[in-house]
Amino acid sequence: MPDEEAETDPDWLPAAPAGREDLVRKLSKHNQQIRKIWRTWTDHYLNFLREKQCIKPRNPRSTTNRLPELGEVVLIYDDQKPRQFWSLARVTELVPSADQVIRSAIVVTSNGRPKKRSIGHLYPLEINDLEVAPGSVATGE
């Protein structure tokens, strides 16, 4: 009978359910891959965003980032949160230091609270919609 042969054929039988050790190993590998993706994103994408905003360097060994512009949307670096939870904010004011060099900015997050942050902790996004007035919503028209 062909049905009896099929039931004993190892190619026909479904795989045995995964044991606890196998599931733990798969979860560990999955978490490793997620960490690798975030590390790559941090090392490459965020640096790309910074380099994209650079002006001509004064010294070949260093670069000077351009100042964020008023109304520009930025990501705010936060070492206490995973990157996917970093806040988005809009730059509302550039704050000069005592020597009149701008090293920080006032940004407003989605909750409406202003925060003073270092220019080095602001990552401009690839979107540049500076034609829209700060606080207004772009309609796409």
Image: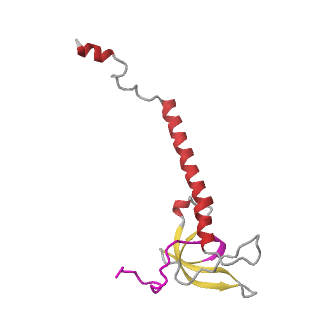
Q: Is residue 133 magenta?
A: yes
Picture residue at 74% right of the left edge, 71% below the top:
62
Counting from the top left corner in percent of width and height, residue 42 is at: 60, 60
Picture residue at 34% right of the left edge, 82% below the top:
141
Picture residue at 57% right of the left edge, 60% below the top:
81
Looking at the image, which is closer to me, 60 or 119?
60
Looking at the image, which is closer to me, 54 or 79?
54
Q: Give the range drawn in magenta.
A: 116-141
Counting from the top left corner in percent of width and height, residue 140 is at: 36, 79
In the figure, is residue 72 to the left or right of 56? left
Q: Looking at this view, name the residue that lies furthest to the top.
A: 1
In the rendered image, the vertical position of residue 125 relative to residue 100, given as above or below: above
Picture residue at 58% right of the left edge, 62% below the top:
45
The colouring scheme, among rainbow, by chain, secondary structure or one colour, is secondary structure
Counting from the top left corner in percent of width and height, residue 13 is at: 34, 22
In the figure, is residue 1 to the left or right of 60? left
In the rendered image, the vertical position of residue 6 relative to residue 106, given as above or below: above
* Count of numbered badges drawn on the protein: 0
Quadrant for the N terminus in the image:
top left
In the figure, is residue 64 to the left or right of 135? right
Q: Does the magenta stretch include residue 4?
A: no
Within the image, what quadrant is residue 77 found in?
A: bottom right
Please tell me whether the stretch drawn in magenta is mainly helix, strand or loop.
loop
Counting from the top left corner in percent of width and height, residue 39 is at: 60, 54
Looking at the image, which is closer to me, 48 or 32?
48
